[in-house]
Image: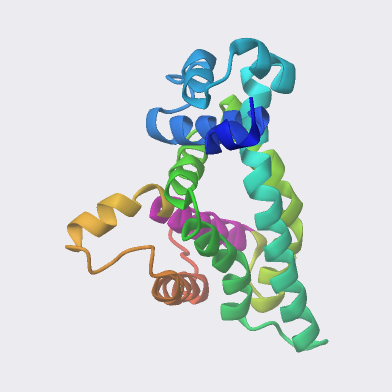
Amino acid sequence: MSETNVSPTERIPTKERILDAAEVLFAEHGFDATSLRMITTAAGANLASANYHFHSKDELVRAVFARRIRPLNQRRMELLESCLQASGEGPLPLEEVIKAFVQPVLEMRSGPQGAAVGRLFGRSYADPLGSPGQSFFELMKEVARPFTEAFRRALPGLEQADLVWKLHFSVGVMAHTLAGADHLRIISGGRCDLSDAEGALEQIVAYISAGLRAKPARIGRN
């Protein structure tokens, strides 16, 4: 077959077509409800090729996450390093640390397949004990420690337990925002949309920074 007779889809390597199809189907139907056969059919491939490239469905799930999360984490660390260098030995500006963590997610969300990736991340966060959730959180460990240290430095004097609670809630804001992007657009009548990455970043940073700075609860403590 000549190059001119090859369709654009066929020019994409089989491995990438399988990853693309898996990403969309996992986001639409969930991990359990999506079979390898559904993925290979959508990718124009066969089960043998999926087994050759990924060996198992769990490995395919991990590969889907890895190709998105690793560049995302690299961008986060670049922004965090810039923040650290600008601050020297002084205190870290809280809003800049939040931006370093959130901005790359919104940049990714506004790119190709961004909506599917956002829903995919939301699904994995909602089920941390399943295989997809475990793969997701394992990859996120790359940035967990440096960002926790950065937030501790930006919020001096905050007890460790309070910091963990606040960071847990903050990550929850991001997960819900990604998973519920369609709901946000519908209930706002289109006025609020994650495609406006700059506006969304301002809103998220303002909300999370207020929560992180809020006085910790002391109900039930002696």
Vertical order, 20 against 78 (above or below): above
- Answer yes or no: is residue 145 visible: yes
Vertical order, 169 against 80 (above or below): above
Identify the main secondary structure in magenta: helix
Q: Quadrant of residue 76?
A: bottom right
Q: Nearer the viewer, residue 3 or 58?
A: 3
Q: Looking at the picture, how far across and down is residue 117, in whole percent?
A: 50, 46
- Answer yes or no: is residue 222 visible: no
Q: Quadrant of residue 60?
A: top right
Q: Looking at the picture, how far across and down is residue 12, in whole percent?
A: 62, 36
Residue at the spot 19% in from the left edge and 57% down from the top edge: 187
Residue at the spot 68% in from the left edge and 24% down from the top edge: 59
Magenta-colored stretch includes residue 168: yes
Q: Quadrant of residue 81?
A: bottom right
Q: Nearer the viewer, residue 149 or 125?
A: 125
- Name the image quarter holding the N terminus: top right
The magenta segment is 161-177
Q: Nearer the viewer, residue 23 or 188?
A: 23
Magenta-colored stretch includes residue 123: no
